[in-house]
Image (spheres, grey):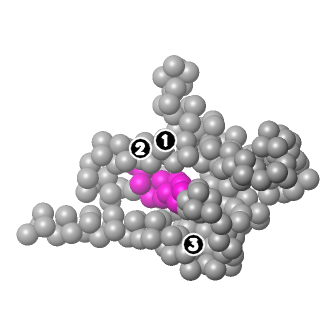
């Protein structure tokens, strides 16, 4: 009976994460009354949105989530965390190229010129925030994938991982709300709530551990 209750509790928590970071943003997207584009561009948009929200879910699917660790063991939590992290950071690294894709189908601006303009335009706060977030993603990917080749100690790597993750979350969310194509009021509220909840959860965990020590 106890094992069944624990399994049901785990399934409930996993379902809650799926609803919060996949179902909700998908519904906000389809019921957001956004201008419709080609199937290719709509697909790239939803992939980008889900890539970002699933990266936000990483705050709740790491070793910090003691309840989840107890339910499915640390090795499984870390496997999920790594899979989601590597997959969706790789997808979001292609985000600038997703913006350039339409230029291949019109005769306004050459794709190469549009890309150069995109990464060298510093007059917009949203663009600057996007570049900072992009830099953080690159650092996170390199330090995670090549941690041992870089000879980073666990303590050093964990500090870098934590600081750059926080910087990425803040700048990326601000970037999305500031100039995102799908940054209506409901989406903005959703992003702010998810980020605030994640940061609160992170700080509460660290503060609790510190006070306990």
Label 3 residue SS: helix
Q: Nearer the viewer, residue 31 or 83?
A: 31
Neighbour class for label 2 at 10 Å: few (<14), some, many (≥20)? few
Residue where numbered disc 2 is placed: 83
Task: Verify whether residue 57 appears in magenta.
Answer: yes
Mark 2–mark 1 CB contact (< 8 Å): yes
* Residue at 84% from the left image edge and 57% from the top image edge: 125
Q: Nearer the viewer, mark 3 or mark 1?
A: 3
Task: Verify whether residue 173 appears in magenta.
Answer: no
The relative height of residue 145 versus residue 104 in the rendered view (above or below) is above
Q: Nearer the viewer, mark 3 or mark 2?
A: 3
Dominant secondary structure of the residues highlighted in magenta in the image: helix
The numbered disc on residue 86 is 1
Label 1 residue SS: helix
Give the CA separation, mark 2 to mark 1: 5 Å
Neighbour class for label 3 at 10 Å: few (<14), some, many (≥20)? many
Q: Is residue 104 left or right of residue 199?
A: right
* Residue at 62% from the left image edge and 43% from the top image edge: 93
Residue where numbered disc 3 is placed: 29
Neighbour class for label 1 at 10 Å: few (<14), some, many (≥20)? some
The mark that comes first in sequence, 3 or 1, is 3
State which quadrant residue 48 falls in: bottom right
State which quadrant residue 177 falls in: bottom right
The mark that comes first in sequence, 3 or 2, is 3
Label 2 residue SS: helix
x and y percent of residue 37 in the render?
65, 66
Residue range highlighted in magenta: 47-63
x and y percent of residue 57 in the render?
48, 58
Mark 3–mark 1 CB contact (< 8 Å): no
Residue 183 visible from this viewpoint: yes
* Residue at 77% from the left image edge and 53% from the top image edge: 106
């Amino acid at each position: 009976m106890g094992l069944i209750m624990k399994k049901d509790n785990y399934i409930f928590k996993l379902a809650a994460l799926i609803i919060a970071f996949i179902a909700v943003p998908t519904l906000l997207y389809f019921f957001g009354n956004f201008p419709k584009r080609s199937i290719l561009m709509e697909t790239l948009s939803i992939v980008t949105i889900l890539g970002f929200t699933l990266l936000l879910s990483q705050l709740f699917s790491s070793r910090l989530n003691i309840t989840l660790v107890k339910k499915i063991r640390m090795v499984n939590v870390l496997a999920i965390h790594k899979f989601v992290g590597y997959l969706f950071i790789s997808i979001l690294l292609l985000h600038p190229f997703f913006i350039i894709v339409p230029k291949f189908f019109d005769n306004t601006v050459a794709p190469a010129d549009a890309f150069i303009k995109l990464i060298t335009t510093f007059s917009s706060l949203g663009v600057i925030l996007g570049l900072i977030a992009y830099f953080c993603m690159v650092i996170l990917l390199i330090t995670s994938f090549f941690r041992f080749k870089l000879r980073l100690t666990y303590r050093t790597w964990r500090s870098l991982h934590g600081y750059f993750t926080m910087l990425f979350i803040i700048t990326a969310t601000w970037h999305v709300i500031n100039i995102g194509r799908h940054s209506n009021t409901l989406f903005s509220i959703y992003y702010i709530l998810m980020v605030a909840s994640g940061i609160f959860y992170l700080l509460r965990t660290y503060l609790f551990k510190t006070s306990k020590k």
